[in-house]
Amino acid sequence: MVDQAVPSATLMDVARLAGVSLATASRSLNGSTRQVGEDLRRRVVLAAVELNYTANAQAQAMARGRTDVVGLLVHDIADPYFSSIAAGVMRAAEDHGLLVTMASTLRRPESELDYVAALRGQRARAVVLAGSRVDDPEMLRRLGSELASFEATGGRAVMISQKKLPVDTVLLENRAGAKALAESLVGLGHRRFAVLSGPRDLLTSRDRLAGFQSGLAAAGGELDPRNVLQDSFTRDGGLSAMTRLLDQGTDATCVFAANDVMAVGAMAALRQQGIGLPGRIAVAGFDDILTLRDITPGLTTVRLPLEEVGAAAIDLVLQPRGDRPRVRRVKGQVVLRDSTPPLT
Amino acid sequence: MVDQAVPSATLMDVARLAGVSLATASRSLNGSTRQVGEDLRRRVVLAAVELNYTANAQAQAMARGRTDVVGLLVHDIADPYFSSIAAGVMRAAEDHGLLVTMASTLRRPESELDYVAALRGQRARAVVLAGSRVDDPEMLRRLGSELASFEATGGRAVMISQKKLPVDTVLLENRAGAKALAESLVGLGHRRFAVLSGPRDLLTSRDRLAGFQSGLAAAGGELDPRNVLQDSFTRDGGLSAMTRLLDQGTDATCVFAANDVMAVGAMAALRQQGIGLPGRIAVAGFDDILTLRDITPGLTTVRLPLEEVGAAAIDLVLQPRGDRPRVRRVKGQVVLRDSTPPLT
DNA sequence: AATCGCCAGGAATGCGCATTCCCTCATCGT
DNA sequence: ACGATGAGGGAATGCGCATTCCTGGCGATT
């Protein structure tokens, strides 16, 4: 038997059952500035329970002129980097009674634009852009314009790790972290390095490369430009880049992959070529992804408190809007493990 | 300078600018059943662009009586099992113009109830419950009642891998997969097994244990009840359970962890105790988490097409409601890797 | 040529709620 | 004793949109 959709009880139904006016019912259930007599109030609450009443959030949103929805845009939720950030966002959102609407842009800038527009349509309280890779000036202009529209209507925008647009930002110290990592690796005795970097248009990846280079410069390591390979920011990208590096021949004793996932791919490539780990070539990553903490050998990396990053984004959203964009910085911490044994 | 929130353009503004009525503007932008003259239509579209108009989704939802939002409830989005499912849900949702609102219940049944209620308030088109662990009869009754309310108002509910409630379900063949895995492991020569199982109230975990037992029974393996340990469904749970197993002493040659994440914890425990891998004790998991495909030694497991599971859930949501709950079954596939070498 | 039917456009209605405005009545001060 | 005050209740309004109903014009039919 197909149940017909029965429109659910409205506030009007509750008011009628309680024998009060709509206004009184509304005030009883939401606690407005106005007082409601205790007896009436109780009758209303009972009626609401009786009817299994749940306020229509759309109608409330329209009447109030605001919603409790925040949008979260990530490249790919299946990527542990983003799912960790998302976990932080969702935890913080729950603490503040916010609902999170999420979408994977699958690294397509147009998709990002579309979703911001959709969230504007939803009159979302805020939008959090994690890992936006918009870089092309034209797209950047369009995104900036779209975000400006979003903010003009009262919404808040927060970017994670992308400081090219004048909006609130949670900045991961990719440069500083990569620099510290480079210095640590030189400290272990390495001199000749290679880097498996992400796509050139990904700011995160570029910063990590730049930081690593500056760390080498400071500590006395070498990075032959031929030893800098680019590929996608994924396991397969790491595998492919490492394979190319080995094919072209290299004298590097240590490879820095721009994130942990690429590092795992690189390790897979080394194994495929019969190069043991830890062994002739040390490998380091970035992020310290939780799920990868137990791989063998333990991966040297830079720990980023990704859940905190997500929480910080929500925190920024809840701050009153300032006169200038705020920036919240989050530090990374070098974690040395067995994938980079000291060079004897 | 703090920009004041400027209410965004309404359809009325667009109509006025185009010099047409509200009705014509609405019909022009949404393509209703009614036709609009080409010239007027064009004027409206131009006006909309000019004003940077975006329809207020709340108002549309109220006028239409439905939304394009689907809710997704997971235990923990940072868990790769759930983030893979979420990726599938989001991909399929995008294909159909749906927006996904997501929440982590952090394994609290009350939280699950609260979110379903919140989604009812949102008048969401559907709610997808991934890995609900509600088991306690009272909670199950309340959840069933909440879902019934949800469906009574026209929403759809889909559960993933939980067939205790009369709603549409995507059923992972945990039993069959675990059974096949057990048979394969016996085929490798193992006879004495141990199982690191998840919490007793988690159906997924129970099914995997039951399936594994039936596979052993069929193929001739032994599972001493003392060798069945329970712990949380996480890496730490696997570590802890494996440690306890080793502490109490065991003659098992193969350990089945109820999911990959626990298996990783178990492998960490073995290493902590100085037991090499692959070596005296073989380890198998379940899920074939993408991020863990490259661990060493390669983890024998049962591959579950988790993204397809998410997509299947959205697919069910979009089917016209049937007279009885539908069940869509998804098979697993045994993948033998180096963590379970043949026993010589 | 008169009538019918059809179609594009506009006015009006209602979705469900918060809130403003208005009214009543009890309480208090002088 | 009587006006001032304020609290609590209800009627009415509007949020932004889709949609129904209505109207006028135009071509087709007899």
Image (tube, coloured by chain):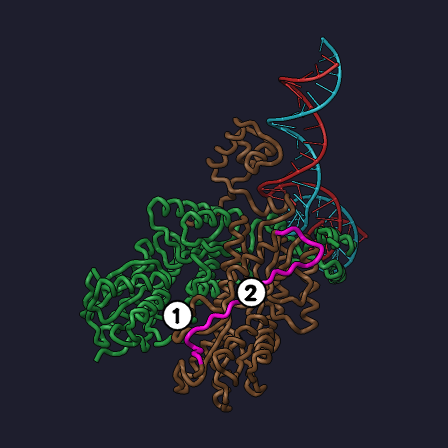
Chain colours: A green, B brown, C cyan, D red
Residues at discs 2 and 1 both on one chain: yes
Q: Residues within 10 Å of mark 1 (few under 14, many from 20)?
A: some
Q: Residues within 10 Å of mark 2 (few under 14, many from 20)?
A: some
The magenta segment? B319-342
Question: x%, y% of residue B300?
Answer: 46, 74
Mark linked to residue B224: none
Give the image quarter of residue A145.
top left
**Considering depth in this image, is A234 or A173 the residue closer to the camera?**
A234
Q: Is residue A130 visible?
A: yes
Mark linked to residue B331: 2
Residue beneath the point at 34% across and 61% down: A237
Side of B108 relative to C3 (left or right):
left
A219 vs A122: above or below: below
**Considering depth in this image, is A301 or A34 the residue closer to the camera?**
A301
Mark linked to residue B294: 1
Q: Chain of mark 2?
A: B
**Considering depth in this image, is B32 or B55 the residue closer to the camera?**
B32
Among the two numbered marks 2 and 1 on one chain, the one whose residue lies closer to the N terminus: 1
Side of B291 relative to A263 (left or right):
right
